[in-house]
Image (cartoon, grey):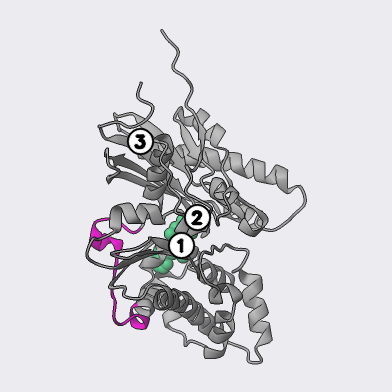
Amino acid sequence: MNAGHTHEAEYYVGLMSGTSLDGVDAVLAEIGPSGQVRLLHTHYLPYADTLRAQLLALHVPQPDEIHLAACAANELARLYADAVKTVLTDFPGTVRAIGCHGQTLRHRPMDGYTLQIGNAALLAELTGITVIADFRSRDIAAGGQGAPLVPAFHAQVLRHPGIHRVVANIGGIANLTDLPVNGLVRGWDTGPGNMLLDAWIRRHNGAHYDRDGAWAASGTVHSGLLAAMMDHPYLQSSPPKSAGREQFNLDWLDGTLNHLDAAIDPVAVQATLVELTATSLADAINRECPGTQELYLCGGGAHNGALTQRISALLPKLSVATTAALGIDPDWVEALAFAWLARQTLHHVPASLPAVTGARGERILGAIYPACPRRKQ
Ligand SMILES: Nc1ncnc2c1ncn2[C@@H]1O[C@H](COP(=O)(O)OP(=O)(O)O)[C@@H](O)[C@H]1O
Ligand SMILES: [Mg+2]
């Protein structure tokens, strides 16, 4: 048996469930001997409202939270297993491993930990496939942020030898990867992505998200609110840095609104939240990535026309497109990244970038939950 490198293509499943709490993205990826990636199958499994509400509640301290989190982790494992089964329907090959990000409940590198739940042992048991999970903890143990982890993957599949590119993944939180022609790959969370947009529209009209940013586009940006939000210390600090619902949430937004004298129309708040995501991303690129020529967007926010228009307008010198222009569907980049990260783990290849996370050095990431050994007949 070859435990390490092989000269043939291998197959991995990637599972991503991000801070948006929208659901599970599952992909089947073919990964070649030098790490080249091909997307074979995809499946999206949205969370039921009850599960989303439970997970959201677990982001802040509450009674009996250890038990509740463990039960939610089991439910997630069953959902993940369903997504894996669907993505593998009619697939005749052998899957080496599932790379499972899990669902973040806390991200506190300043306290030395991050917590992604999803009972990887149960997922291995339900699928019979090796599962790699808990990708972030090792980097935090080495003094890093544990995030973002996708820059190494972006560098593998999207870097160009002659063009300075930046990749921005707009999930619940937005993160960017700087891919200069020469020099280090860097990356960090720039601030809120869709999270506040989703929370605000849900509060005001019950929708899960603002489709194409249509509601936001019908409002006017409130410059006082934008300035107050841009004052957030996170947005003013330098990388390496990573963020979560700890920094950006409805309580923070409500507090900021309360500090302003004027009552602001809800639709203007939505428009201003779009501007916040666009401005924090554009500022980060202008400040930290001089010379960028091309910006590629991925994640659910790439479908928000109001948002992508504002990003393009704030960065007039850049060519802005989604990763589809480079042949990678923007909806599946992160799940593909976790398939690729699982492959790096099994091949004993470090996948963290100290220039991104600030860790003492690169590390092999992830915890391995092996498939059951096959019994001899
Ligand atoms: N058509 C669309 N218009 C506007 N926003 C969208 C659209 N499709 C997806 N989104 C946004 O993308 C989010 C999901 O993005 P995703 O990349 O899955 O984030 P995460 O990694 O945090 O789960 C949704 O919650 C929504 O805010
Ligand atoms: Mg998602």
Labelled disc at residue 171: 1
Which portion, as a residue range, is magenta? 312-330
Query: Looking at the picture, how far across and down is residue 311, in whole percent?
Result: 37, 77
Q: Identify the secondary structure beneath mark 2.
A: loop
Identity of the residue drawn at 41% across and 77% down: 282
Q: Quadrant of residue 155?
A: bottom left
Using the rendered image of the protein, determine whether residue 342 is visible from the camera's viewpoint: yes
53 falls in the magenta region: no
Q: Is residue 75 above or below residue 196?
A: above
Closer mark to the observer between disc 3 and disc 1: 1
| Residue, disc 2 | 18
Q: Tell me whether the residue at label 3 lies in contact with that at label 2, contact meaning CB atoms closer than 8 angstroms.
A: no
- Relative image position of residue 145 (x, y in whole percent): 55, 57
How far apart are the alpha carbons under marks 1 and 2?
7 Å
| Label 2 CB sits under 8 Å from any ligand 1 atom | yes
Looking at mark 1, is its residue's CB closer than 8 Å to ligand 1? yes
Label 1 close to label 2 by CB (< 8 Å): yes
Crowd class of label 3 (few under 14; some 14 to 19; many from 20; radius 10 Å)? many
- Could you tell me residue 30's position as x and y percent? 29, 40
